[in-house]
Image (cartoon, grey):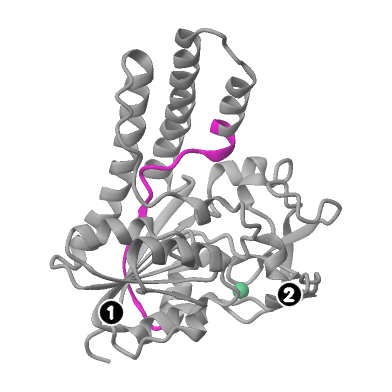
């Protein structure tokens, strides 16, 4: 028998950081990406007391499946970067540049980890999707484990990495206390219903002195502020339950009794909407010659470059770029 389709149900929640209920409406928007509930608007509120920005009311755990279709892109990401295509000319240049960018994104994460944990140890990637990051860490000597909610993604990850990937959430995670030197959550914490609970559970899974590395979109981003009311796409409503700022994420980590070591802008992100609009225009153009198609590919890369430049300037100079990392440690002495 087919499992029953989940029904939409909503719940109201207090602020996860201060427990308050005094909020002000920040944005209103729909799921413009997957159109899962085309007529339904969700509200994003900001806590007046502590500034935490969160979806409220929000889908209950039982109805979350509605908002994560199997086409959700990270579930289908290939483990390996594509092989060099061997194409020449502009197209080949474009291929090589994209490969190089993917490599630089990965190395930024690896550098951040080895800054605090220089020797390879045991690493858990929470929300590991199809296991791309874990595969890369395995090749540089780490003992890896993964946790993922999507059955489809777990199946793909297990095909590539073996039985080290578990299906479930942090509450059901099977590993004992003090299991890991590093826990990573890349674009995951904004999806969890109870971030303080998740961070406490991660603290429990970490060895004393172990670190957690979190990467999230930036709720203080200038683009969210400017476009939030007109275009909810970058907000990923209703999949993103929280829109953290450096200050609110720091507060949540401290509440979970983690010692915050670093907050750092993500260097390899673009301002999503600006880049999206430029790339969308280029996609409408369908040139007939191969030179034209190569020009279009380079144009896509140029649009990425424009978004990248905006993200770098706003992120590095003002802390208002599209994403940021937080690194925190489980204290060795309580
Ligand atoms: Zn609050």
Q: Residue 212, percent across and down?
A: 34, 71
Range drawn in magenta: 257-275
Is residue 260 within the magenta segment?
yes
| Mark 1 or mark 2: whose residue is earlier in sequence | 2
Residue that lies at the very extreme toward the left in this rendered image: 119
Give me the residue at 33% from left, 90% from top.
177
Q: Indicate which quadrant contains ligand 1.
A: bottom right
Q: Residue 286, percent across and down?
A: 60, 15
Residue that lies at the very extreme toward the right in this rendered image: 39
Real-space CA distance between mark 1 and mark 2, rounded to the nearest whole angstrom? 35 Å
The residue nearer to you, when weighing 231 against 106, is 106
Indicate the secondary structure of the residue bearing disc 1. strand
Give me the residue at 34% from left, 48% from top.
80
| Residue at numbered disc 2 | 3
- Number of the front mark, 1 or 2: 2
| Image position of 300 (left or right of 193) | left
Q: Residue 146, percent across and down?
A: 38, 71
- Asked if the residue at label 1 sits under 8 Å from ligand 1, the reply is no
Give me the residue at 29% from left, 42% from top.
104
Rendered view: 147 above or below 38: below
Indicate the secondary structure of the residue bearing disc 2. loop
Residue 41 visible to the viewer: yes
Residue 185 visible to the viewer: no
1 and 2 marks in contact (CB < 8 Å): no
Q: Residue 109, percent across and down?
A: 30, 55
Query: Can you tell which quarter of the image residue 134 is in?
Result: bottom left
Is residue 209 within the magenta segment?
no
| Residue at numbered disc 1 | 180
Give me the residue at 39% from left, 38% from top.
312
> Which quadrant: the C terminus?
bottom left
């Amino acid at each position: 028998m087919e499992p029953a389709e989940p029904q939409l149900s909503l719940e109201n929640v207090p602020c996860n950081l201060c427990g308050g209920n005094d909020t002000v409406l920040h944005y209103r928007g729909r799921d413009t990406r997957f159109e899962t509930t085309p007529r339904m608007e969700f509200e994003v509120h900001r806590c007046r007391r502590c500034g935490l920005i969160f979806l409220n009311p929000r889908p209950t755990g039982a109805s979350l499946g509605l908002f994560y279709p199997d086409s959700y892109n990270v579930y289908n990401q290939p483990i390996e970067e594509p092989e060099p295509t061997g194409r020449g000319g502009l197209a080949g240049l474009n291929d090589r540049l994209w490969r190089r960018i993917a490599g630089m994104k990965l190395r930024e994460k690896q550098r951040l980890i080895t800054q605090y944990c220089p020797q390879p140890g045991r690493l858990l990637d929470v929300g590991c999707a199809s296991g791309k990051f874990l595969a890369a860490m395995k090749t540089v000597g780490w003992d890896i484990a993964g946790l993922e909610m999507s059955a489809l993604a777990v199946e793909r990850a297990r095909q590539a990495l073996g039985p080290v990937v578990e299906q479930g959430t942090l509450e059901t995670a099977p590993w004992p206390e003090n299991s890991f030197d590093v826990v990573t959550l890349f674009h995951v914490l904004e999806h969890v219903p109870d971030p303080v609970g998740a961070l406490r559970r991660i603290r429990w899974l970490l060895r004393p002195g172990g670190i957690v590395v979190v990467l999230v979109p930036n709720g203080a981003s200038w683009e969210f502020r400017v476009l939030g009311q007109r275009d909810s796409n970058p907000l990923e409503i209703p999949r993103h339950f929280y829109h953290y700022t450096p200050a609110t994420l720091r507060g949540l980590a401290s509440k979970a009794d983690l010692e915050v070591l670093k907050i750092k802008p993500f260097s390899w992100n673009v301002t999503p909407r600006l880049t999206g609009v430029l790339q969308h225009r280029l996609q409408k153009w369908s040139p007939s010659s191969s030179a034209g198609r190569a020009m279009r590919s380079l144009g896509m890369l140029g649009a990425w470059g424009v978004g990248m430049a905006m993200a770098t300037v706003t992120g590095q100079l003002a802390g208002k770029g599209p994403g940021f990392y937080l690194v925190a440690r489980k204290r060795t002495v309580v």
